[in-house]
Image (cartoon, rainbow, N blue to C red):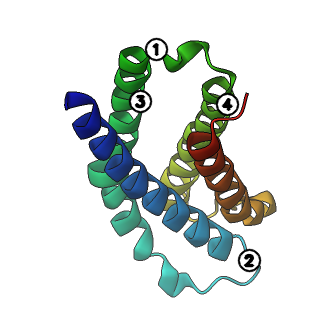
Amino acid sequence: MIYLWLKALHTAAVLVWVGGLFTQAALLAALARPGVDPSSRPLIPSMRRWDTHVTLPALILVWVLGIALGALSGSFSKSWLSTKLVFVVILSALHGMQAGMLRRYSANPDFRIPGFVRWFPGLIVVSVVAIAILVTVKPG
């Protein structure tokens, strides 16, 4: 029974984390466009507060609960979980990059968001789809 509760909490934390991650990515992609309207600047402190109080704690819960689930189920030796963890590490690193860019953008009005951030929303979608397939099908 505890396993199901941990799994439910893990799933909820993933949904919150990915929602925040995708919102950050969409905002950064918009800010990376040439000729960004300066009126978008007030969104940055709000996004940073949301990240600090919601998205980052959800990320921590995802990792803690995921490790607990892997240990309880004995799944760490399974290839599907190793592959899933690669995508989770990529998304975790992406979260750190995005949070850093938002922090630098809010501190320095001359900071330019790099153009490659326009690829972040697609990378998130591909990673989440891959994770969903791996967790559901459990290939190998």
- Single out the mark in the foreground, 1 or 4: 1
Q: Is residue 117 above or below residue 79?
A: below
Q: For the residue marked with disc 1, what is the amino acid?
A: Gly
Query: What is the quadrant of residue 69 in the picture?
Result: top left
Residue at (63, 34) in percent of width and height: 84
Q: How far apart are marks 1 and 3 (CA)?
A: 12 Å
The quarter in which the C terminus is drawn is top right
Label 1 or label 4, whichever comes before in sequence order? 1
- Rendered location of residue 125, percent (x, y): 66, 60
- Type of residue at label 3? Gly
Q: Position of residue 106 (x, y in %)?
A: 48, 60
The Cα atoms of the two marked residues, 4 and 3, are separated by: 13 Å
Tell me, yes or no, if residue 117 can be seen here.
yes
Residue furthest to the left: 1
Label 1 element class = loop
- Residue that label 1 marks: 74
Q: Earlier in the sequence, mark 1 or mark 2?
A: 2
Dot label at residue 33: 2
**Residue position for label 4:** 86
| Front-lying residue, 29 or 17 | 17
Mark closer to the chain start, 2 or 3 = 2
> Residue 42 versus residue 1: which sits nearer the camera?
1
